[in-house]
Image (cartoon, helix red, strand yellow):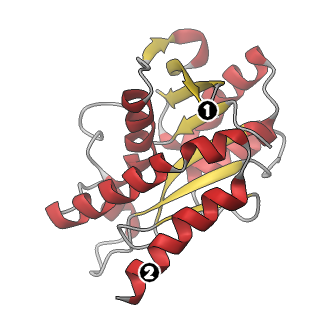
Amino acid sequence: MSVQLIIGLGNPGEQYSNTRHNAGVWFLDAVARQFGGVLKAEKKFLGAVATVSVAGTSVKLLAPSTYMNDSGRSAAALINFYQIDPEKVLVAHDELDLEPGIARIKTGGGLAGHNGLKDISRSLSGFQGYHRLRVGIGRPSSSGGVANYVLKPPGKTERADIDEALHRSLAVLPDMVSGAWEAAMLALHTRYDKRESI
């Protein structure tokens, strides 16, 4: 199944732009830069939207301007307007269960407690079969709590690792968009497995 829409999850506003919870938006921004898209605010979609061409396919990009917990309204507005099959949606989001520097592709399955994913699934009448790009941010080592952790910027080394994961994810995007999911996973996951074994 090919990709017609990429959603980058995060919170709006300058105060959140560099926080871990915005890793999905970081990926979306990288896609826009790489493929010549310009994200522009569109009120009817409650977010910033661009259109790019990837592997010969026209792909919409969406960064919801709602807060993370309300991402579904934005996603549903665009999906319904353009009549996009939810199975052709890729959602990029931060992932606590993966270390910085690791990214994984997943289709369907559980939502791992991620409020942005929960709200998107709710807005799609419970459908969870869309694709996800899980961008690792790791878990807090202290007792500060997850909410505090995801709303803070990563350290310099962490951010460099996350950026490397985004770069590698970008490299396999043409495979994802064209529906070559096994090839994309093999390239992305194998590289990270080698990295983890060092």
Q: In the figure, 197 relative to 106: above or below?
A: below
- Mark 1 to mark 2: distance in Å? 27 Å
User: Crowdedness of circle 2 by 10 Å Cα count: few (<14), some, many (20+)?
Assistant: few
Q: What element carries label 2?
A: helix
Compared across the picture, whether 152 is left or right of 115 comes to: left
Q: Name the residue under label 2.
A: 194
Query: Which residue is the extreme one toward the top?
Result: 43
- The residue positioned 33% from the left and 75% from the top of the image is 140
- Residue 20, image x, y percentages: 34, 55
- The residue positioned 41% from the left and 83% from the top of the image is 196
Q: What element carries label 1?
A: loop
| Circles 1, 2 touching at the beta carbon (< 8 Å) | no
Three-letter amino acid code of the residue under disc 2? Lys
Instruction: Please give the count of numbered marks on the rendered protein.
Output: 2
| Residue 22 seen in this snapshot | yes
Three-letter amino acid code of the residue under disc 1? Ala
Compared across the picture, whether 188 is left or right of 168 comes to: right
Taking depth in this image into account, of 171 and 140 the one nearest to the observer is: 171
- Residue 18, image x, y percentages: 26, 45
- Name the quadrant of the C terminus: bottom left
- Residue 168, image x, y percentages: 42, 55
Q: Mark 1 points at which residue?
A: 55
